[in-house]
Image (cartoon, helix red, strand yellow):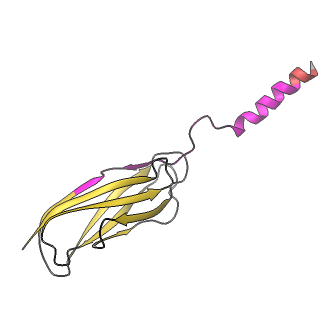
Amino acid sequence: MKHYFFSILLCLLTIPLFSFGQKAPIITFENKACDFGTVKYRPKSVIKIKFYYTNTGNAPLVIYKVDSSCECTVPNWTKKPIIPGKKDYILLTFKMNGKRGIVQKSIFVNTNTDEKVTVLHIKGEIIS
């Protein structure tokens, strides 16, 4: 009887050590694409775009790195972990730098989520 009682007690004490749900962050973007429309070219002008996201998981979210498909798009983001339920954004600064015509760029968000990389897109047109 002692062994039976001890076994039950041991099981009850170790239950909190096991995870019943997945303990991972999840990055959920409001939008993964932005069309900034048609804009007139102006020397040294920039277009600023914010991609809002929420950590909908149940562990802190870390954005390790944000890369762009070209040097004309500069990302800025919070380097601190984002706790579950909190909202933040990635700010992209697109430098026109003499560009005209249709613009399409990809942004790669590297995180500690199960997906590891989320791809965002911006597009628009720059006219003279």
Q: Closest to the observer: 68 or 29?
A: 68
Q: Is residue 21 above or below residue 47?
A: above
Which residue extends farthest front?
69
Position of residue 86 measured from the top left corner of the image (x, y, whole percent): 46, 53
Which residue extends farthest bottom?
43
| Numbered range of the magenta stretch | 6-34
Question: Which quadrant would residue 41 be assigned to in this image?
Answer: bottom left
Q: Is residue 110 above or below residue 3?
A: below
**Residue at position x 84%, y 26% in the image:** 7
Residue 80 lies in the magenta-colored region: no
Question: Which quadrant would residue 108 be assigned to in this image?
Answer: bottom left
Position of residue 126 measured from the top left corner of the image (x, y, whole percent): 12, 68
Quadrant that contains the N terminus: top right
**Residue at position x 47%, y 49% in the image:** 85
Residue 19 lies in the magenta-colored region: yes
Q: Is residue 70 above or below residue 36?
A: below
**Residue at position x 33%, y 61% in the image:** 107
Q: Is residue 80 above or below residue 18?
A: below
Q: Closest to the observer: 69 or 34?
A: 69
Q: Is residue 17 left or right of residue 21?
A: right
Position of residue 9 measured from the top left corner of the image (x, y, whole percent): 83, 28
Quadrant that contains the C terminus: bottom left
